[in-house]
């Protein structure tokens, strides 16, 4: 009898049951869907349960806070969970470009269902772009832009979008290293990348426009996203800048929507820092030659010591990809 009373006493104690629950902390800039998938709990059912379990820990209604430990929903039977996800969201996609550990992509949302994106990382192949240096390490612009591009592409696929990855490296995959190995393996969807600048830019626009000629019949919303790491002077620390083609109504709206999300995220994660990223029209070859509405994003300055921190940490690269996706979701919803 005494033993039974002791057990009942323990069960009644605050925190006894919660101590048995699994918990985890989010990475910097991570959203709820990505956080849950990383912890083996993909899908809307886990998402809704997570909101109920953590309603007092979330910032606003659905914002994770870096450094906070959240309660994870109990795992369901694996086969049952997989079946529900296939019925609810369209199952799993396979993309080898993401690397062996991440090549299976669980579709966990539908916020971008019906949208198509052409994701293009800058430079590549014989052209490394701008080169920064940290000690004995060279930071090549094309490698860091490519890693963010892959992370963005995967995020978009998780939300139900069709994604065309224009610049590709079959070996790299998504990498968590601080200093990314440099190579000249990149291709333009399998074709060697020319050394000449105009030929190089025209090649990727030709790929996009050929795909768009077919995609526009199926998708009402198609967008080209060009990602670069600015090559300004070493002293220039820069925020993220968003460019659209001159006279492009939807390009300007897209740039503003993505910029607004970045400003919100900077205020959230770095209060008091301020954000000076801007939106403007710019006479860039790829913006003028891309048939679908295009956005050109300069993510920072790979040659600046402070901006380098934005890129060498994989959590920061993931945060950039997450914020880009949220901006694209915002624009898609305003279509």
Image (tube, helix red, strand yellow):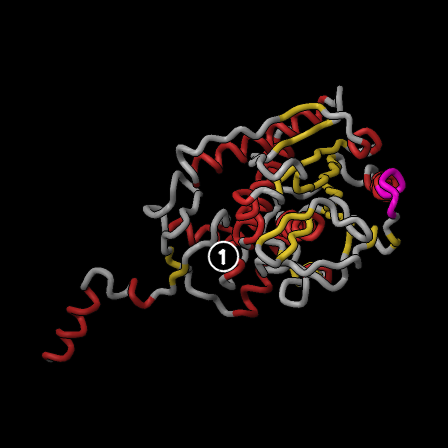
Q: Report the span colored magenta.
A: 195-200
User: How many numbered markers are drawn?
Assistant: 1
Please name the residue shown 63% across and 52% down the image: 151
Please name the residue shown 58% across and 42% down the image: 304
Residue 43 position (above or below residue 206): below
Q: Residue furthest left?
A: 2
* Residue 150 can be seen in this image: no
Q: Is residue 163 left or right of residue 151?
A: right
Q: Is residue 134 left or right of residue 163?
A: left
Element assignment for label 1 = helix
Please name the residue shown 76% across and 35% down the image: 220
Q: Quadrant of residue 172?
A: bottom right
Q: Is residue 196 magenta?
A: yes
Q: Is residue 121 left or right of residue 319?
A: right
Residue designated by label 1: 36
Residue 259 position (above or below residue 211): above
Q: Quadrant of the N terminus?
A: bottom left
Residue 238 position (above or below residue 38): above
Q: Residue 299: x and y, percent?
A: 62, 40
Q: Residue furthest top?
A: 247
Which residue occupies the foreground of this view, 182 or 172? 182
* Residue 67 can be seen in this image: yes
Q: Residue 46: x and y, percent?
A: 48, 56
Q: Residue 99: x and y, percent?
A: 68, 64
Q: Quadrant of residue 130?
A: top right
Q: Quadrant of the C terminus?
A: top right
Q: Main secondary structure of the magenta part?
A: helix
Q: Residues within 10 Å of mark 1 (few under 14, many from 20)?
A: many
Q: Residue 291: x and y, percent?
A: 83, 32
Q: Is residue 188 magenta?
A: no
């Amino acid at each position: 009898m005494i033993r039974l009373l002791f057990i009942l006493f323990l069960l009644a104690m605050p925190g006894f049951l919660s101590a048995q629950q699994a918990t985890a902390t989010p990475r910097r800039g991570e959203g709820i869907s990505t956080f849950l998938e990383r912890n083996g709990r993909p899908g809307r059912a886990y998402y809704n349960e997570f909101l109920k379990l953590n309603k007092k820990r979330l910032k606003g209604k659905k914002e994770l806070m870096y450094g906070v430990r959240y309660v994870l929903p109990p795992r369901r039977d694996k086969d049952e969970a997989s079946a529900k996800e296939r019925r609810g969201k369209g199952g799993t996609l396979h993309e080898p470009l993401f690397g062996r550990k991440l090549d299976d992509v669980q579709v966990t949302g539908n916020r971008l269902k019906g949208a198509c994106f052409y994701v293009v990382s800058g430079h590549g192949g014989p052209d490394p772009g701008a080169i920064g240096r940290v000690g004995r390490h060279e930071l090549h612009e094309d490698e860091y832009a490519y890693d963010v591009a892959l992370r963005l592409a995967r995020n978009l696929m998780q939300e139900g979008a069709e994604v065309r990855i224009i610049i590709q490296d079959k070996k790299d995959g998504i990498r968590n290293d601080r200093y990314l190995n440099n190579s000249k393996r990149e291709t333009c969807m399998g074709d060697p990348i020319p050394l000449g600048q105009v030929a190089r830019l025209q090649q990727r626009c030709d790929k996009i426009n050929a795909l768009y000629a077919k995609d526009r019949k199926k998708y009402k919303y198609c967008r080209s996203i060009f990602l670069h790491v600015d090559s300004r002077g070493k002293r220039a620390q820069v925020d993220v800048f968003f460019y659209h083609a001159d006279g492009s109504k939807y390009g300007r709206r897209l740039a503003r929507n993505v910029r607004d999300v970045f400003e919100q995220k900077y205020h959230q994660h770095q209060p008091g820092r301020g954000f000076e990223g801007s939106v403007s029209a710019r006479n860039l070859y790829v913006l003028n030659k891309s048939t679908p509405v295009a956005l050109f994003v300069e993510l920072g300055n790979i040659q600046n010591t402070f901006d380098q921190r934005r890129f060498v940490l994989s959590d920061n690269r993931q945060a950039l990809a997450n914020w880009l996706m949220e901006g694209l979701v915002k624009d898609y919803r305003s279509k």
